Amino acid sequence: MKKSILILGAFIGLLATSCGKMLVVTPPNAIYDEQIQGILNGSDESKKQLVLNSLASPFVKYFNHWGTPMPGGVLAPMTYCYQGIEQARSLQGNDMVFGLNKNNVNDLAGTSYYEGTAQYTNEDSEANKAHWFGYAYAINQANLLLGYMTKEAASKSETTADGRIRGLCIRAYSYMCLAEEYCQPYMNAGETATGLSLYTVYDPGQTPVAPSSLGATWNFIITDLEEAAQLADKKSDANKFTVGYKELEDFDAGVVNFLLARAYLLTGQYAKVITACNKIIGSGKYSFIKNENYGCNPTGAAIENSATKYLPQNNAFTALKKNPETILGYIHESSYNPKTADALCCAQTRLQNPFGAYSSGGSTVRIDNRLYDKIAANDIRKNAFYPESFNFTFNASTTPAEVPSYAAMKYGAGVGIKDGGEEESDQSLVDHQEFCKFRLSEVYLMKAEAEANGGGGDAKTTLNELLAARTVGATALTCANYPSMSGLSDIEMVRLQWRIEMWGENGREYFNNKRWNINIDRSSSTNHWAKALATKWENMTLDIPKEEKQNNEYYK
């Protein structure tokens, strides 16, 4: 019997089983493998584009995983999409404070993660299961795509090469996320430690695969990305980078080299980190966020005036047209950007907006005072947090509510965005914002960290470029004059700037703590209320979910 795959019609269903046994395919309106392969190996580019549109174009959603099935449970609001998973990780770190106290937060917004009561690492945890099977589903779909977008087909057509880049990137990214969550850090555990089961073909009936070594796992990830980089260079040379929000679903050389740089960084290949970062920086297609667009920048008494809208169109973290750093992002019109009331409980742009729906319930996220005090007075990033408490009248309320001190203004917006970028007139739609996934500043931080670890170049020089872009006033901030960096080593400077620049983004603090051997310790904070949380970096690794163990005897 010919094996068929659905490319139109009903959506492919998800079963919570192993990587190799996750899909049920229903084939109405289907065409056969042989027909697809014939098109992709033929000469009609218009037909190839139709196949690409059906199979490969939606793959950008797997960087956020919104709009695809994920298991849930009592912690489902934090597992609907990757924004939710990453937000949960931020709440589990040192640098993010959650609300005023336990009696003044919305539990669905992540209280259990923040105070350490969420059972997220256990093999039978619903949250754990959602993380595993979300990434596994994307890997399965990538293998399905790569079965058609073969090396041979990609060598004959730019269209097919585009599809192969998408499959390689998503497979590598998903395995990278699994490795960060479910494996010990490579630089701590070494290449012989246990890695992941590596699946390279789509076959619902395939025999389970034994876990590879950690070294083999990371080599698999990097091999995928290096092939994607070669294809991207042919498809679009380094001088033709496109910014993510301009071509939302474009898997360009910027995205590929960003992923490569991170994979190299996590495996200690520091010279290669610098090369990948320099390709992005040297393209000339990205520039730093302007000071006036770094957060909503509220000042003075106006912040207590609920009529002040703090337009999202002026904030680089809520409107990508104001974010020239964007390498990959999701505009408002994107069907992969959550913006409905139920889904946005997992989005950074909802949970981190002090003027949004969750803040009205007391769930304002704040910066730990210990980190705030390390930000220089003439650093624009200090304005991304408001040191004093204030009252604000939220939508559908006539009584002002308190927004606590150190509230994050990084994602601040008083109204929402309509399709096309126009301002929403209805404050109840305040959570309709845009979302940046990968951006230029992280590239500079990866490069500086690689340089500080001996990869070549000078970490201070790289950091000085970032600091100059964040300076308020005529005298540029540098490693030499940044007050809290006095006496620090190069790597300590880099780590501090990671915390300041990437605060609240992609769970970076948590994952960096894990690979840097830094424990969670809030005991000396004045504004953390869940001070008892004290997680050791060794305990930040998740167990393989029970359902996966049941279907793969090698994980038992």
Image (cartoon, grey):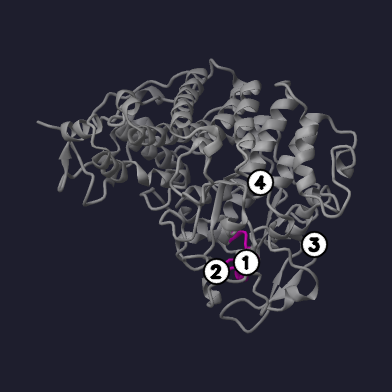
Q: Tell me the amino acid under the disc marked 3.
A: Pro
- Dividing the image into 4 quarters, which one contains the C terminus? top left
Contact check, label 4 and label 1, Cβ < 8 Å: no
Query: If you read the primary sequence from the N terminus, does the residue marked by circle 4 or circle 1 appear first?
Result: 4
Q: Main secondary structure of the magenta part?
A: loop
Pointer 2 local density, CA inside 10 Å: few below 14, some 14–19, many at least 20: many
Q: Which residue is mark 4?
A: 287
Pointer 3 local density, CA inside 10 Å: few below 14, some 14–19, many at least 20: some
Picture quarter containing residue 382?
Answer: bottom right
Q: Which residue is mark 1?
A: 413
Contact check, label 2 and label 1, Cβ < 8 Å: yes
* Helix, strand or loop at mark 1: loop
* Helix, strand or loop at mark 4: loop
Q: Tell me the amino acid under the disc marked 4.
A: Ser
Query: If you read the primary sequence from the N terminus, does the residue marked by circle 3 or circle 1 appear first?
Result: 3
* Above or below: residue 534 compared with residue 273: below
Q: Tell me the amino acid under the disc marked 1.
A: Ala
Q: Which residue is mark 3?
A: 387
Name which residue lies at 43% across and 36% down.
Answer: 170
In the image, farthest residue toward the top: 192
Q: Which residues are magenta?
A: 351-363
Residue 131 shows in this picture = yes
Residue 403: mark in rendering: none
Task: Please provide percent x and percent y for residue 367.
Answer: 73, 54
Q: Which residue is mark 2?
A: 416
Query: If you read the primary sequence from the N terminus, does the residue marked by circle 2 or circle 3 appear first?
Result: 3
- Dividing the image into 4 quarters, which one contains the N terminus? top left
* Helix, strand or loop at mark 2: loop
Q: Say whether residue 357 is magenta.
A: yes
Relative to residue 362, is residue 380 drawn left or right? right
Picture quarter containing residue 551?
Answer: top left
